[in-house]
Image (cartoon, grey):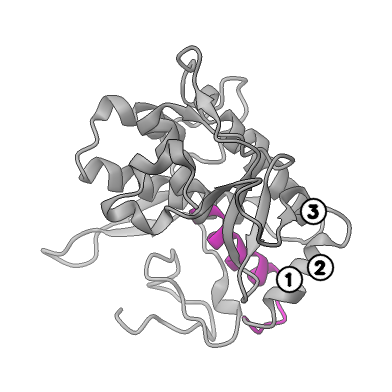
Amino acid sequence: MTIPALAPLFVGDFEYYRDMLVLAGQDQRPGIPAADLVSDGGLEWLLSGYRRSQPGDDNRALLSLWSRYYFVKLTVPVVAANLVLGRDLPVALDRIEVVLDENGLPEAFRLPDEGRPFEVPPEGPFDRFRELLEGNFEPLIEGWCSQIKLSRRVLWNNAANYFDWLIETMAAGGVPDAILADGHGIIEREKRPDGRPNPMANPVRYVERGEGGEPLRQRRHCCIRYRLPDLPLCRNCPHIDRPPKGALLPEDV
């Protein structure tokens, strides 16, 4: 059931995401606290369940691929609600539950409430998206990387890639630049306000490939899904022109 306050978002291109945020008390499907994804034994349980639908022995690649589903399904509705509706949603890792589908992938996120409009305008992009980036993505990525030797850059690029794609899609759909300004800020600023590097910065680059063609939108870091059986490189993989040994190429490249 769509959260009533967010219903105006989920039309047209965004209708697919209408049921990815649900409310506690209204949705009765089994779910797990998101914080359990980084608890002792939680990550092992998660990958064990996912491996039943996605074979593979490389836990780094399994985690990276699983995280892509997590990041896109959470990022799109949360960021759209923030920018378009001015609504701050309670999505910190210790506040939400994850509903998994039959393949062990995120199907929906259960929130404790429908959030609220910002009482005062956010002081820049990092203030606006603090709940999502510092409350959810950062502890999730740190928790995972403390258990599996996977580069933080890979996971942050998984998240930032979808953030960047969403902002581009909204801009192409006619959303005014003024509304998207803080979204652009997240992916354009090299540093956070406290001087630390911004792990969401510059997640993609555009590479010329032949005369007259559109530049290729290319991720900064490979998600390493090609390490899993029968999965090729992504079309926007940074290794697309020099594939690793044994990696499969996409059929349309």
User: How many numbered circles are shown?
Assistant: 3
* CA distance for labels 1 and 3: 13 Å
* CA distance for labels 2 and 3: 11 Å
Mark nearest the camera among 2 and 3 is 3
Look at label 1 and name its amino acid.
Leu
Image quarter of residue 227: bottom right
Q: Residue 99: percent from the left, percent from the top?
A: 64, 60
Question: Residue at 72% of width from left, 50% of height from top?
Answer: 34
Look at label 3 and name its amino acid.
Asp
Which type of secondary structure does the marked residue at label 3 adopt?
helix
Residue to which mark 3 is pinned: 36
Q: Answer whether residue 65 is magenta in the image.
A: yes
Is 182 displayed left or right of 145 in the figure?
left
Question: Residue at 56% of width from left, 20% of height from top?
Answer: 193
Of the two numbered discs 1 and 3 on the same chain, state the one appearing first in sequence.
3
Is 242 displayed left or right of 141 in the figure?
left
Give the camera-side residue of 242 and 39.
Answer: 39
